[in-house]
Each structure stands twice: as structure tokens, then as C-alpha cells.
Image (cartoon, coloured by chain):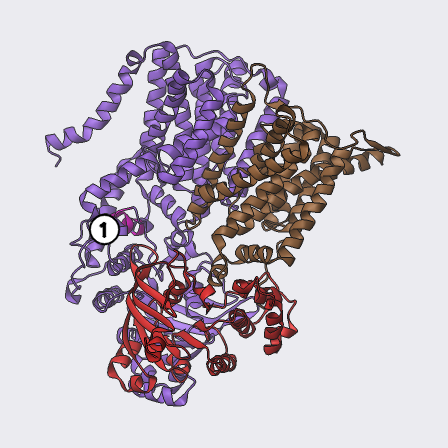
Amino acid sequence: MTTPSRLSQRLAAPLGVVALIAAMPALLPNDFRLYTAITALTYLVIALGLNVVMGYAGVISLGHAAFALIGAYIAAAAEFHLGWPYWWSWIVAMVVCALLGVVTSAPALRLGGFAVAIVTIFYLSVTTTLILHYRSVTGGGDGIAAAQADLSLDQMWWAYAFVVAVLYLAIRNLVLSPVGRGWQIGRLSPVLAESLGVRVSVMKVGAFSLAAALAGLGGAMYPALNGYTNTEPFSLGMGILILLMVVLGGEGTLGGPVLGALVITGIPVILNEAFSAGGNQSEFVYGGLLLAVVLIFPRGLVGAIKQQWHRLSRGRRLATTAQPVALEEVRFAPPDAPAALEIRGAFKSIGGLRILDDVSLAVEPGQVHGLVGPNGSGKTTLLNLIGGFLRAEGGVFRLGGVDLPSTASGRARAGVSRTFQHPILLEYASIFDNVLAGVDAERAVRPLHYLLRTGRARRAAEEARTHATEWLGAVGLGAVDPTTLAANISPGQRRQLEIARACASRPRALLMDEPAVGLSAEEIGSLMTTVRAAAASGVAVVLIDHNVDLVLRLCDVVTVLDAGRVIAHGPPEKIRTDPMVINAYLGGDPEVSVNLGEVVR
Amino acid sequence: MVDFLTAVQAGIETGAIYALVALGLGITYATSNAFNFAHGEFVMVGAVLGVVLWQSMDVPVGLALLLTVFVASAAGAATERVAIRPFAAVKDAAGWMIATLGVAIMLTAGFTIAITREPGSTDTRLFPSFLPRDRPWIVGEFLLNPNRMLLVGLLVVVAGGLLWLTKRTHVGRALGAVADDREAAAIRGIPVNRLTMLAFAIGAAVAALTGFAMGPVTQASVTIGLGLTIKGFVASAIGGMGSLGGAVVGGLALGLTEQFALRYLGTQWQDLIILAVLLVMLSIKPEGFFSRDVRAV
Amino acid sequence: MSDEQRAIDDGLRIEGVTAGYGAVPVLEDVCLTVPPGQVVAVLGPNGAGKTTLLKTISGIVRPRMGTITYNRADLFERGSSTAAASGIAHVPEGRRVFSRRTVEENILLGGWVRRREAGLHASRDEMLERFPQLGARRHQLAGSLSGGEAQMLAIAMALVARPSLVMLDEPSQGLAPLVVDSVFAEISELRSQGLSVLIVEQSASRSLPLADVAHVLSLGRIVVSGPPEELTENAEFRDAYLGI
């Protein structure tokens, strides 16, 4: 129950913003300043979209002005040729640009990084050329003289500010939902995203398309304000300006574009007092700012502020080592339908080299199955095949008697989860958010609900939060402050956190790649308890590790690989004394292997 | 037929420029795994600084060229140090992309401010020919303009020079090693950071040389930078990122494509054709035609 | 200083070195020596820090604390490591040859520290003779070599620099047993030529017979050291090596 003081605390910021928006026309000295501010709002709309695609989906689009250009012409042409009111054409512009975004992102996104940036620049020049070419509709170089919206400047400010506020809230809802987490994880590590069942390419296309829609809206807001449009304002320069807003403010942060827009709009105002002609001086400063920001404040101004705040707040202190987890206390939520994992006759060659040859493996629900073998025996490759991260050339992969889908994200959705040799975590997110990412994999709610923050979305979020807390407790992190950043916990805790995330989706099979790397003896104890708890809940666990002793103590069954083939299989006691195993690991000098063989009792 | 061959000639002449840009871009990309957005600006510097020194400040043409190339090399090395190296450790491309974009913008804006200071001056300066003969030779139906021929000749010289460098000198070999596997090079005692900076200096020098030679053909305009960087990228995409032969082939192919699109379809469709070519290349063979990716058999 | 004392101080001395990549150090307070002409083995599981140790000596990783001296000269005196120039050659894990250069070029590149010497090309030819499989493939791209051939190339690249200490990181990794035999035969050769050898391995069986001293590295610390004969009888060693 929120107390009155808590409530007023939460409402303070939004109310302040509303008051500021309402008072703005009175605060600004003249019409020109107000006009500049409204123009800045249209840029902000585009920046909000660019922030999503850049900061969250990790795609740098330089020619984004192309979509703004299209939006502007749709609005102007609709008003001029068809007499539509602007708000209709705004919606049409958003829809058209969203669709165009889907179409244009498909070829571009496969390229990644620099190539995408260049391709988007081409989009802008091609769009501009096409618009200039079809004179009858677009008026060619003269543009379209559509009517200005029938509002006073003050009213226009309030209307546009309202639109921006709604967009900000909608994006905030998305970012704080599984959709937003999916973006962040996809940007951090596509492999991790796939392992959590996120279809990275679909996600990126979605982000791009959203950004395109917002750019279209921002562009469509131009003719309503100015009473005409042509191709000039929508240049590469505009794209770079908006990029700068996002980067300076802080890409991947919610407040970033807003702060960035404020600062960028302010610069020419300040400069105009100092220099006679705006243009090139501002450009020079913008270039310098881009360079400076990315060198000094890589996460922008908002990011830098957040970092300082975290330094001062509680989250900074390194969390103490969690108490070893006692087995009786731990209960893992079981999967819906525990199933056996079955691999038969797996084949894999890479570049002509046979890595795996006719390998078979069977894991019952509740079993911990160890996979060992010397370096180069193919263990990790096998794990990747089971997870769907590599394509097998032959072999059957089944879970619960049903063939597994071919993609990693498909297998993740079918109930195959994994951990990595070095835990891949969202370092600047809290441990709570990191576990939440695993709970998300249970997603059943459509993104639209999150966007609009419907009752269903809120209930799902509440449930997710409860589960996340439970999972943190189940792996022994219950005593740690959930807002602690993942970057600040110990290696053992990172491993436990990763396991919590992997199990939070209640998988039917769990693949673990060398989970004991870098852990102290005590931390290994906690690890073993956690793995046992996962198995006890009905999960089929496959575990690779070089720590032979750990494997022999933890696993119910062990399969030994050597040079891509299975050379031994059975309970740990049998494997300990198997001469073939001893030879494979220690093979070479007979005297030495005899001595060590005696030890491996 | 004559039309066709004229188009081919124009394609080769323009393509030579793109190939030269791609060569410079390729050296820097190969050693740093980063595309320098500011590369085209070094070409611009070659033209603009060159003509300012030569025409406005009456520096003898040879010395002007030398100074320009020197300044550009220094700028190239500085770009590596400031805009590329800090991001070498991070996997995210955003860092160096935005940083080099910032450098590019600063260079364009800076030079624009510098040469438009006098009232009435524009962003383009006239660049007279510096060759002993500047009237074209007439061979049958074809016009051979010495300034354009110079560019083709420059391509041959530069490509040859770079080939000699990488095959016959220790430094060149070491640059190739850095491009191949940076850490492996460092392990063998090769100074990878200094060599990368050298690669950027060489790339910028080639760019400036190109800009100076281009001057009489295109005049010295401060706005050519970004466009050339993009053309260089497309040429690399066609021919193979970071490959010498690829840069030459890609540049020529791009030049030919552009000229043919121009002659038979008109100016407005140029960019669309190039975009289509780019998308096709990047989809079917992202590493370009000449990439030699050898794996152990 | 007596001759004996000088001999003790010569060679590679690592004292109290702490090093790592990010916030968490991978090596903690490591002390180790490789006296001239001796073979030292460092054993340990994945993640123990063995590769980081060699990378620190070569200067890829900067030590945060401690000193590394070679023949009484501090390797890090001028900031980055002078290991290669001081005569320490590194054969990295996974070979790491330059796959897009020819075998010949690779050997020349291995000799970078001698690039100003007139004899470098002659040394290259020597290497091609000493390793006939490489000689037969001198103009082939290194990326087309088999695992064993690439390992020989990596060793040749180290030897052409005329080092006094050769460091090998898991030379047997990913190679068939017969090939491993020839690799280790080559390593014995090195020792008989008076070179010091520092070998880092996951599997004890191959390296222990060659070594004068062995250390076990676990979680960034040296936990047990001694001559091989003593170690295999030592319960601590067994626990440390097998059950970490």
C-alpha cells in the first residue's frame, strides 16, 4: 500500500513535467524561441525512435531522415491533394513507415554495424531522388505548400508536447517490459538471446520498424507546423543531428534523447550570441561533441549521471559471499512436463575435420549426466549441437520423444536452457533484472499489451517479479540486495545468478558448459547443491567440466568422449577405473599414468 | 559502339578514383577492423589544402603536394590514436563509428569555415592543372585528358607500391600480420599499436595524393568527403574488404557501373543502382570477391 | 657477486605478480623461476591462468603488481614488455600462425626482432631445412597447414628469433597422439641445445617426463611445486591437480 508521502514522491516528477509543459509558452521570450522549441519536439520524436533502435537494438541508422522525409510528404500531400486533417495523415504516415521499416531492415540488418549505417544513407539519397522525380505528386524541388494546422503557436506547443509525452510513456513501457529486456540482451549477446528463446532478427526488425514509424511521425509533424514541406530539411545533416541528440543524451537510456534534444537545441542559441553565422560553427561543434561524448561519456550524459549515482548509492558495495546453500532448503519450480533428452548418432564435421562421430546420449528427467573428455574431444561442440547453436550433419535430437526444432531459439522455447563457460550477464543491470530476463522466457503476453500497459501486462509483470525473487532465493542470492549491479558480485554469485536465469524459464533440459571454471572450493559446493536441486525438480541436466573430481561426485551417469567418439559410458565408479578413460586423459608415459591412475581410485 | 567505349573509358577514369579511395580505406580497415568515416575527408584535404597552398599562398606545386600529404598523414595517425584505438577493446562498433563520424564532420566544417571566410567565396576553389600539357589527346573518336589519365596512372603506381610494401618489406609484412591476427602479432614482439597508426598515416597519405591529383578534374570542393568515403566502402564491399586487388577491382567495377547507369538510365537512378548492387553484394558475398579466407583443411 | 649467485639470478624470475583483464585478477601473487637451460612445466586446469601467465610475460597483459625480470633486467621497465627483444619467444596456444601469409613469410615475421640483421633470411632458410614439412610448403598459405604442421611452424617462428627461452602454451592441444610425439621430441631437442623452456599444459603425462621442475597453477595461484618424481608421490599434488 503506497503511503501518501510515497505517492506524492512518485507523482512529483511527472507533475513537474506537466507544469513545465503547460507553462512553456509563457516562459519563452518570443515566438521564434517557441517555434524552435516545437521544432525540437519533432526532432525528439525521431530521436526517441532512433534511441530504441540504436541504444537497445544496437543498430546505427544514419539515414533515418529518409523515413521522416516520407512522413512529411505523406502528411503534406494528404492535406494538399486530399484535404485530410493532419492527425489522420500522421497515423497513415506511421503505418506506412513502419511497413517500409520492415521491408528495408531485412536486407540491412543481416549486415550489422558499419554496413547498416551506409545502407541507410543510401535509403535517404534514393528516397530524395525519387521524391524529386515524381513532380506531379510531390511538386519536385518546390515541395508542397500544404496548409498550416489551424492552431495558435501556443496550442501547437501543447499538442506536440502531449504527443511526445505519450510516446515517451509508451516507449518506457516497452523498455521496462520483456520486449525491452529482449532488445538489451540481443545487443549484448545474440547467442544468449537465442538461448533465452528470443528471435534476435525478428526483434531487430521490430525495433527498426518502430524507429521508422516514429521518424515518419516526426517528419509528418513538420508541414503541420510550417505550412509546407520540401526535401531540404530532411538531409544527412538532420540525421546526424538526431544521432547526436541520442548519443549525447545517452543511447540506451530513457531520458537520454530528451536531455540530448535539450542540449543540442540550446547550442545554436548559445552560439548565435558568440558567432555571426550559425551553420558551420555549429557543425564543427557537433562534430567535436560526437567525438568527445563517445570518448569521455560513452553512455552519454544520462549514463554518466547514473554511474555517479550508483557509485554513491548502496548498490556499489561488493556483496559478501552468499552462505553455502543447504540442500533441504532449496526447491526449484519444476518444468511443466519433465521429459527425457535423447541424442542418437550425432555427426559433425568442420572444414573437413570430423569433430563428432556417431555420438549418442540419453538423459532422463532428474538425472545429471556428465560429459567429459580431453581437450579437443568434441564436448563443447556436442553441447552446442544439442542447444541448436550449431547444425548437426546427422543424428536425432529429441526432447520428450519429439524432434527438437532446428534453431537455438526454437529449442529454447521447446525447453532447452543453457549456461556459458563465462556467465554472460547484463553488467549494468541489477541482479533482479538479470533473473527477470530468464522469467521472461515464459512470456505469454503480446508486446502490444506491454506498450499500452494493460491489466494483463501489469499482472504478468507482477507475477514475473514474484518469480524472480523466488529464483534469487533458490540459488542462495536471497540475502543480497536485488538492486546490486551484476558487475559487482563475486564469480561464484555470477554463476549462481546465471543458473537462476537459466532455470527461471522452467526448462526441461539444462546444458551447462564448464560451470566450475574460476570457482573456489566453497563456491563449487554451492554450485553442486544448486545443480542437484535443478535435477531434483525434474530437469534433465547435461554438464561438461574439466574438473574430473567434480563430475564424478555430482553426476549420476558419465559419458566420456575422445576424438569425437564415445569411449566410455556409465556410473561414475565405473568410469573412475576404466583403463580407456585413464589412457585418454593421461595417455602417454606409462609410468606416469600408472601413478596417477592409482590415484584416480 | 563508340558510346559504349566512351562509357568504359569514363568508368575506368572515375573508377580509378574510387579504387584509390578504397585502397587507402582498406589498409586502415585491415589493421584496425574499423572503417574510418573520415577517410574521404583526407581526400578533400588533399585537394583543398593543396590548392590553397599552391594558388593562394604561392607555394611551388611540388612543395605544396609534399606539405599536404604530410599534414594529411599526421591527421590520419591522429585519427587512429584518438578515434579508433580507444575502442579497439570494445566489441561494439558504435564507438569508432561515431568518433570517426565526428572527426569527419569537424574536418568538413573546419575547412568550410577556413575557405569561406572572405565574403563572396564559395565552398569550391578552382584547381588548375599542374601537368605540362592539359589539352586532351585525340585518338580516333576518343578524348584522352591528361589529368584523368594521371589518376589512372596514380592508381597503378600506388597499387604497385603497396604491393611491394606488403610483399618485400618487413614493415609491410608486419602490417599484414597485424591485419591477420593482431594478438598473434603482438605475441611475436610486433608493435601493433604503432603499426596501426602507421597504416592510418599511409592511408591518409594515399587519400591526400588522390585528392591533389583529382583537383584539376573535379576542382577542390569541401563537400566531397563523406560521399567518397561511401563510394570507397561500396567498392570494398564489391571487391573484398581490406584486400589490395579487391580495392582495385571493386573501385573499377563501381566506376563502370556508375557511368553505365548514368549514360543509359540518367542521373537520378545512379544511387538506386548502386544501392541495389551494394545490397546484392552484401547479401550474396559479404566478404567480397577477393577475400581470401583460408581455413585449415 | 659470485658466479653461483649470478647464475641463480639469471633466467626468468617472476615475483609476486598479480595480473588480469578486468576487475578480477586472473593471477594472484605468482612466483616462479626458469633458470637458464632448464625445463619448467606449469600445470593446471582450464581457467587457472596458465595462458594469462604467458601473455603477461610477453606483455599482452600488464601486471598490476610484482616484477618480471629476465637475466636481471626488468622486462617492464619502459612500459610495454621487452620480452621478445630480450630473447624470450612465445609459441601461443592454438598455434596462432598468420593464416593469410605464406609459410616463408610467417617465419620471417617470427623473426621480427631480428629484422635489421643481415642473417635473418639465412635463418629462415635454416628453419625450412630443419623442418622439412615446412620447407616443402614454403610458398603455401599457413592457413592450409594441418594442426601438426602449424605447430611446427609456430615453433619455427619462435626459433628463428634466436631466443634463449622458449615458452610453449599447450603444444599438444587438438593434435593426434603421433603428432604430439613429434612435437615433444622437438621440445626435447630444444633443451639439448641449451635453451630454457617454459611449458604450460593441462595434461601432466607428456610434460612431466621432460621437466626439471613442475608447478601447479590453480585459480591464479601456484599451489604446489617441485621436481616431477616428488610430485607424483605427493598427495597435495594429486589433490591439486586432479580434484580442483
- Camera sees residue A38: no
- For the N terminus of chain A, the image quarter is top left
**Main SS class of the magenta portion in the image:** helix
In depth, the one of A466 and A523 nearer the eye is A523
Pinpoint the chain carrying mark 1: A
Rendered image quadrant of residue A251: top left
Residue C147 coordinates in the image, percent (x, y): 53, 72
- The colour applied to the residues of chain C in this rendering is red
User: In the image, is B15 to the left or to the right of A293?
Assistant: right
- At label 1, the amino acid type is His
At x 36%, y 29%, the residue is A260
- Camera sees residue A20: yes
At x 35%, y 79%, the residue is C3
Q: Which chain is brown?
A: B
Residue matched to label 1: A467
In depth, the one of C112 and B93 nearer the eye is C112
Task: Check the image and report above or below for C232 versus A483.
Answer: below
| Range drawn in magenta | A429-438
Q: State the SS at label 1.
A: helix
In depth, the one of A428 and A307 nearer the eye is A307
- The colour applied to the residues of chain A in this rendering is purple
Residue furthest out toward the right: B140
Rendered image quadrant of residue C75: bottom left
In depth, the one of C147 and A197 nearer the eye is C147
Say if the magenta span includes residue B184: no
Residue B251 coordinates in the image, percent (x, y): 67, 42
